[in-house]
Image (tube, helix red, strand yellow):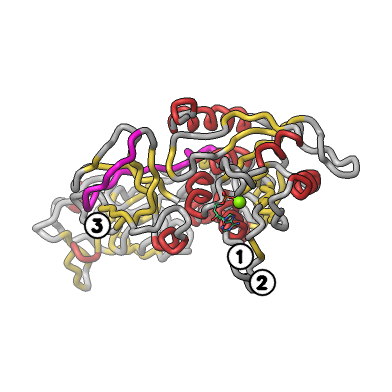
Amino acid sequence: MNSALLSYDEAAAEVAAYAAALGRAKRAVERVELGRAAGRVLARPLRADRDQPPFARSTRDGYACRAAEACRHVLLPVAGATRAGQPPAGRLPRGAAWEIMTGAPVPKGADAVMMLEHVEADGRGVKLLDSRTIAAGENIVPRGAQAGKGEELLAAGSLMGAGQVALAAACGNSELEVFALPRAAILTTGDEVVPVEAEPGPGQIRNSNGPMLAAMTAAVGGEPWVLPTAADAAEALDAALRGIAETDLLLVTGGVSAGKFDLVEPALQRAGAQFHFTGVRIQPGKPTVFGELRGNKGGSEGRQRRRRLPLFGLPGNPVSSAVTFLLFAAPVLAALAGRRDAVPRFAWARLAAEVKGKAGLTRFLPAFCNFGASASALPEVALVPWQGSGDLAALARSNCFLVLPEEAHRLEAGSCVRILLP
Ligand code: AMP
Ligand code: MG
């Protein structure tokens, strides 16, 4: 019965609480070269190794001056010049200007930089154009304005992207301490599923969930460990689960619905799993299972399995697997990775055309959002036509999922809707 299942919000709250508790746990740290730090999570705060900027810096090519003198529109003799890379000059003499380049240190005494385009120059000096004024502080970033020496620039738990890597470089870090990647074991199941290299026989399909979940795991900040596909048989599933020794997260796909050969839940139970939920009022992804393996059952040769191994049973249909990974597995994986930012990510968009809901289920439908829309309006989102949750081509053509709330029977064109971002 649907009503016995958790709503999306209830299931999401359960996962969020679990992830928050995981986020407080201690985790292993390793050093990586800066060139390999993108996608990793900082284990220690990044601090400024010196004032940023380290000197009062000109943001323009032009002439350093005292703003009050420049505003008199008199000719100011040019007392010297500083290029980027040269050390700071001495003091700017009274009633003079100083030629300066973008990124160069501004001489002491100067409080503004007149842009090259805003002065008249002749052999004797420079003069601010009559049509212009200048105020103290213009075109100068004072020393330490961005950060003082020792100040925290990025907190531990920050996900490293290009900007963060650049900042780390600016602060002299050729290596960084990051959290060890959490490992996600990915166990696909199904008698019909064959490896990508194999030629599928009649009735067989290639394993697309394995590579997809590996890619999604890596994108969140985990290390995928793709296991061989297990057959739809109790012994095969038991053996596969026994083989999962050292991992931080277990993802099983397929075999979690109510069909005759959906044997994953009982197998997990035999392995010692306890469940937080075994279904959510969402579509696709209703049979999703969230639980954990407790104790050391199934660990091989004295290796200690984590005392509590979080696990997800994701429905086998590719769109269902993708949606439920994003909604439920990704927040747990992000917490295991030490990330502090919010996962999953949602945004708002304007609906291009009417969409019908399904009473009693929150729906997450493959959609394409035009993020390059106009400056004054929300980005526009439209459903990608699809043939149901097995439609991988629709998934691959989408760049987000349109969220249809449980209570929405119909969303009109132009309405403001939530989208789930990959
Ligand atoms: P199940 O959740 O096992 O009932 O599977 C639902 C649908 O997903 C079936 O059509 C399966 O063939 C398909 N499926 C299951 N596992 C995979 C996989 N690893 N890759 C692609 N499709 C799959
Ligand atoms: Mg199956």
> Is residue 160 depicted above or below 405 in this figure?
below
Is label 1 in a helix, a strand or a loop? Answer: loop
Q: Is residue 340 magenta?
A: yes
The image quadrant of residue 346 is top left
Which residue corresponds to mark 1?
204
Total tally of numbered discs in the picture: 3
Q: Which residue is mark 2?
A: 198
Residue sitting at x 49%, y 25%: 4
Amino acid marked by disc 1: Gln
Mark sitting earlier along the chain (3/1):
1
Whole-number angstrom distance, CA of label 2 to CA of label 1: 10 Å
- Look at the numbered discs 3 and 1 and tell me whether their residues touch, using CB distance below 8 Å: no
The mark nearer the N terminus, 2 or 3, is 2
Q: Residue extending furthest front?
A: 260
Residue 386 visible? The answer is yes
Residue 350 pos. (x, y %):
24, 47
Q: Which residue is mark 3?
A: 373
| Residue under the point 28% across and 63% down | 62
The residue segment tinted magenta is 339-359
